Image (cartoon, grey):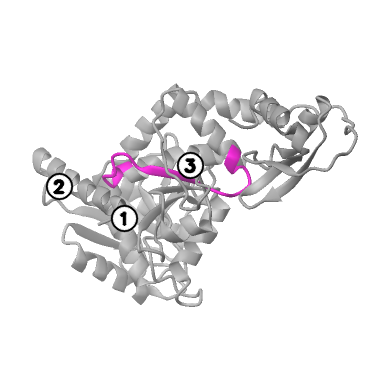
Amino acid sequence: MTEKIKKRVAGVFNQLADAVESGEFGEKQRIGMTLLDSEHGVDELKKAAEIAENRNRDIDVTLIGCGTSECDCLADAHQIMDKMLEEDEIDAAVTLHYNFPMGVSTVGRVVTPGKGEEMLIATTTGTTDTERVPSMLKNAVYGTAAAKSLGIEKPTVGILNVEGARLVEKNLRRLVDGGYEINFVESVRADGGVVMRGNDLLLGVPDVMVTDTLTGNMLMKIFSAYSTGGQYEAVGYGYGPGLGKDYDKLIGIISRASGAPVIANAVKFMAEVSRGNLLEIVKEEIKMAEKAGLKDIISELKESKSAPAAEEITAPAKKVTGEEIAGIDILEIESAKESLWKEDIYAETGMGCTGPVILVAEEDYQEAKDKLVELGFID
């Protein structure tokens, strides 16, 4: 039994113990599900509801649309769904093509092909923030909250190797220094590190894979439909619940291409996070992250991006650059190079096996590295 499976089993037992202690054991989770706009038709969605109820005796699915409620289109169904949530007629909902407000994005859940591991992808739809790095910092918090609501007490976190990953790592470590707990996981690749590669995706190395929403959306589609040619999502749990500061509805997202197996799992996913008090956990995680400096870090990132352009810097005399300095994010690579030029150290930029690198002459390597550490480009 792998360590991740052990943690999930422990989490399930903890949830059961809490249910027994609170006297809520046996109560059904009421999940609403809209029936309109699937590419596979209404019957596929009804089939999913039947599967969900048959496999999970603690779930009661309420169908919304197509003769079960008075509505002619998905927008009408969403209005009915929202009202049912507000009036506590249902605990959570599953739908598609839902317009979350700015600042809300979804945490998806996949089954990875390498070892059949489950992994959360933070995030997969919606807009956490208008800028990538601040988005990914918040996504790490939301993904952690989702994992905890599933009973994973200390979820492991990895950062997908996309543009901005090194900046995200640097600033998440600042949150850790400020007191926010993050359990970073190491890549399975020989050079390790918290920045995850494609191998880590396929193996499901972290409990929570942090990425930007557009990349996360693409990953969800690949993981869900790689075995079917793309038109039918057959594997996984859907794009997940929409999470954001002060957002108070539990609405899980599926795709128009989602098939009955995925939709049934999405219903189960929403029942699990509802029972696990996800919205309350999100509030607490945001509170702890902000206490550790999240707001200040994001403000600094946005101020630095809007700062006026620096003066043009002339390169020192060219040298043969045979040494690599890794660990600098691509968004900062030019600034790092020019910072060395200011110190009369010739440097170039390049792309190594794990991302962007600074290239310097052998005799300048240690001085250049020390300067980049001093300036905060690398640790």
Of the numbered discs in the image, which one, if any, rests on residue 163?
Answer: none
The answer to whether residue 66 is above or below residue 3 is below
Q: Give the quadrant of residue 151.
A: top left
Say left or right for 331 vs 202: right
Say left or right for 218 vs 186: right
Amino acid on which the number 2 mark rests in the picture: Leu
Asked which secondary structure carries label 2, the reply is: helix
Q: Earlier in the sequence, mark 2 or mark 3?
A: 2
Task: Tell me the quadrant of the picture where the C terminus can be found.
Answer: top right
The answer to whether residue 313 is above or below residue 150 is above
Q: Which residues are magenta?
A: 148-166
Residue 307 in percent (x, y) is at 75, 27
The answer to whether residue 38 is above or below residue 204 is below
Q: Which residue matches tag 2?
A: 16
Amino acid on which the number 1 mark rests in the picture: Phe
* Disc 3 versus disc 1: nearer the observer: 3
